[in-house]
Image (spheres, rainbow, N blue to C red):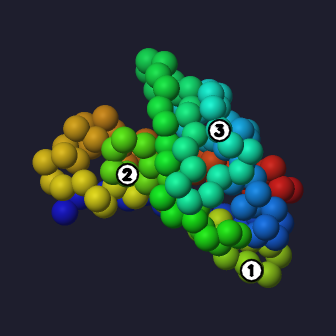
Amino acid sequence: MAARTASGSVVVPAPPSEVFALLADPRRHAEIDGSGTVQAIVEAPERLELGSTFSVAMQMGAKYRTTNTVVEFEPDRRIAWKHFAPHRWRYELEPVEGGTRVTETWDASRYNAVTFLPVRALGFPAKAQQGIDGTLLRLRERFS
């Protein structure tokens, strides 16, 4: 079976509560987006929680707008969201010496083999991996 996830980790010099505060504020996602696709937040609460929705102006080739829903939420430990498709963007935080290990994962494991074909044709999960690498770099720089 072909890979259906992309993931990476970085240690940032900040406690989990500070990192989580940034991730749980969707208005700040463009600050750390390493993919270049997040243009602006269109509508969002100040702080995300389980079930929250937020709309994002995106650009991946064409400009478009999507609405995400928070589907996993554990304060200072884990947050994930998805849009209409079954893949998720997940951040997991682990306190370590010197700060917080942040693991970002693009998880498309909920697709079946047939519905994953067009996603793969668009260049995923490789595109997701490039975005994750860039995001984690920006996140580390943000707290350095």
Left or right, residue 28 beside residue 130: right
Quadrant in which the C terminus is drawn: bottom right
**Residue at horizontal 57%, vertical 50%?**
52
Lower sequence index among marks 2 and 3: 3
Lower sequence index among marks 1 and 3: 3
Whole-percent x and y of residue 49? 62, 58
Q: Secondary structure at mark 3?
A: loop
Residue linked to disc 2: 87
Left or right, residue 123 beside residue 16: left
Q: Secondary structure at mark 1?
A: strand
Q: CA distance from mark 1 to mark 3?
A: 31 Å
Residue linked to disc 3: 44
> Within 10 angstroms of label 2, few (less than 14), some, or many (20 or more) residues?
some
Residue found at the far right of this picture: 144
Whole-percent x and y of residue 51? 53, 55
Q: Is residue 32 above or below residue 4?
A: above
Numbered badge on residue 96? 1
**Residue at horizontal 83%, vertical 56%?**
143
Mark 1 or 3: in front is 3
**Residue at horizontal 31%, vertical 35%?**
122
Left or right, residue 144 beside residue 31: right
Q: Secondary structure at mark 2?
A: loop
Q: Nearer the viewer, residue 81 or 141?
A: 81
Amino acid at the residue labelled 3: Ala
Amino acid at the residue labelled 2: His
> Within 10 angstroms of label 3, few (less than 14), some, or many (20 or more) residues?
some
**Residue at horizontal 36%, vertical 41%?**
84
> Within 10 angstroms of label 1, few (less than 14), some, or many (20 or more) residues?
some
Residue found at the far top of this picture: 62
